[in-house]
Amino acid sequence: MKELKWLHWEYHPSPFDGNNFHVKELRVLKLWGEISDKWQGWSSITMAKKLKYLNLANCRSLEGTSFLSAFENLEVLILHGCEELKQIDSSIGNMRSLECLDLTGCDLLEGLPAEVGKLKTLKQLILHWTFISSLPDSIWALQNLEILDIQAAQIENLPESVGALHNLIILNISQTNIKKLPNGIRTLRKLQYLSAANCEKLEEEIPEGIYNLSSLHHLDLSFCYKLPSLSVLPSSLKYLSITCKSRRLSSLSNLTHLKKLRLLDCESLECFGEHPSALLEKSVNTPFELEILIIVRCRRMETLDVSQFNHLRRLQVEDCDKVLEIRGLNKLEYLESLEIAASKSPKACSIERLDLPMCKKLRIFEAKSCINLIEIQGLDKLGSLEGIDISGSTSIVKLDLPKSKDMKIFNVKDCVRLVEIQGLDRWESLKGIDISGCTSIIRLDLPKSEGMKIINAKNCKNLVEIQGLNRLESLEEMDISGCESLEEIDISGCSSIVRLSLPKSDGLKILGDTNCQKLVNIQAQNSLQRTEHFAKYFIQGLGRPMFEDLRELYGGLYKSLYGV
């Protein structure tokens, strides 16, 4: 024990007997449990004068830190989740080698001692989810500080002297009560990451000096609902997330290195970027590198032009009710995911037509709840698609599907006017299909897919015929409840089927054989007469051995089989 250098100790004894417990060579210590600042073990632990790493995370009985005076060589001090901790001892100022101080989740901690300013080697100060309402003036003497995280602390003001932290790389002030960013921020030339997300009281414009932050790559101003507008931002940005009250965001035109842009809850935003013609003219010599564009709840935006973003890989437009047109889709040759979704209000999504890009890389296409969408041009040319979801797009009448060898998921739920689906029978890799609520579909032609596991055709009340069902050896679940016009199903080849939900239909013929040995859950909405017929069919067609595994019977089926 005399040479012990690393100790991770849980469920320590209390009371503590420190005889023969030698820790003078200890470098790393992690304690966990009901440790308080009055714990008897500190008398032995404080002998570890060479200690460099002390982790007391989640020691929820700890109220003070008077024991810290013994550890002047500490480099890392973690007090994460010490919920009863009320103060940090001033002796912390003697830790001349401390590089990381983590006080995350110290709910009762209201302040830091002024001696924190003496920590000349400190690189990380993490005050996430503390009750600290202000920072000591001395903190701005921390010339080596690289990370300052005060997320969800009670801090209301950042002083101008923040500009003295010349080595700061990460500044996280999100979820605080800060009302403005100080002008001093313009001198943080090494700053790479700035997050003010969810600063709902941030009400003054971002200082113009932010343009000088040539190292800034990540700027998050999402859900800053009172932010009036943006100043010109540094061209070094690669990630930008915004919520503001501006009608236009012309200041984005110089962000030629931007990779990801999120426009969230910009309720007044009518367009972003300069006039399309001016923007296109600029982009000839300075091509935009944007790869991900996400626009959510920008309810005044009517036209979206993405033609200048020719490197775009993902486009998401959600709950932008007034958008009539998305221009430039045909120019997005690298697009992999196109996601359009509307709210379920009657006025949701005004888009009537989509011209999809002739893109070899597009894998995901969604146009959910687009109730005015009538036509989708180019869908049949997208041979790399893996998933289609146009659920709730109630005006679609016909779909001409592409021949895609990788298609896995097809969802047209509640497309109530959809009458015809062409090309579905060609998708041999399909794993799931949902046409539930498609009340106009009459015929369904299924592909011969070795991986098809789920079919949901619930409440397709006009569905008369399902072709190809008997070829689906991997099918596990099928729901045709509510398909009252269905005349016949053939499950003879569905050897893996486990669950089957049936409609209330006395005329339904069920063809099958003894291959359906795994069927253990049958839900039948049948009348008693229909249920008796169904029971009789299984007795004759599948034989008694099946009922050894049959566990769940619904709709009176159990009553019909009782005693068999």
Image (spheres, helix red, strand yellow):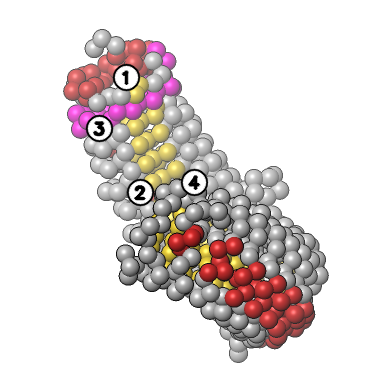
Picture residue at 64% right of the left edge, 78% below the top: 118
Instruction: Give how far apart the Cα atoms at labels 1 and 3 are.
Output: 17 Å
Residue assigned mark 1:
534
Mark 4: few, some, or many residues within 10 Å (few <14, many ≥20)?
Answer: many
- Percent x, y of residue 260: 57, 71
Q: Quadrant of the C terminus?
A: top left
Magenta region: 504-528
Disc nearer the start of the sequence (4/3): 4
Which of these two is toward me, 257 or 387? 257
Residue furthest bottom as drawn: 285
Instruction: Give how far apart the Cα atoms at labels 4 and 3 are.
Output: 28 Å
Residue assigned mark 4:
412
Picture residue at 33% right of the left edge, 68% below the top: 2
Which of these two is toward me, 423 or 405? 405
- Which of the 4 quarters of the picture holds residue 471? top left
Mark 1: few, some, or many residues within 10 Å (few <14, many ≥20)?
Answer: many
Task: Identify residue type, mark 3.
Answer: Lys
Q: Element under label 4? A: loop
Residue 121 is at least partly visible in this image: yes
Disc nearer the start of the sequence (3/2): 2
Task: Identify residue type, mark 1.
Answer: Phe
Task: Identify residue type, mark 2.
Answer: Lys
Instruction: Give how far apart the Cα atoms at labels 4 and 2 are.
Output: 15 Å
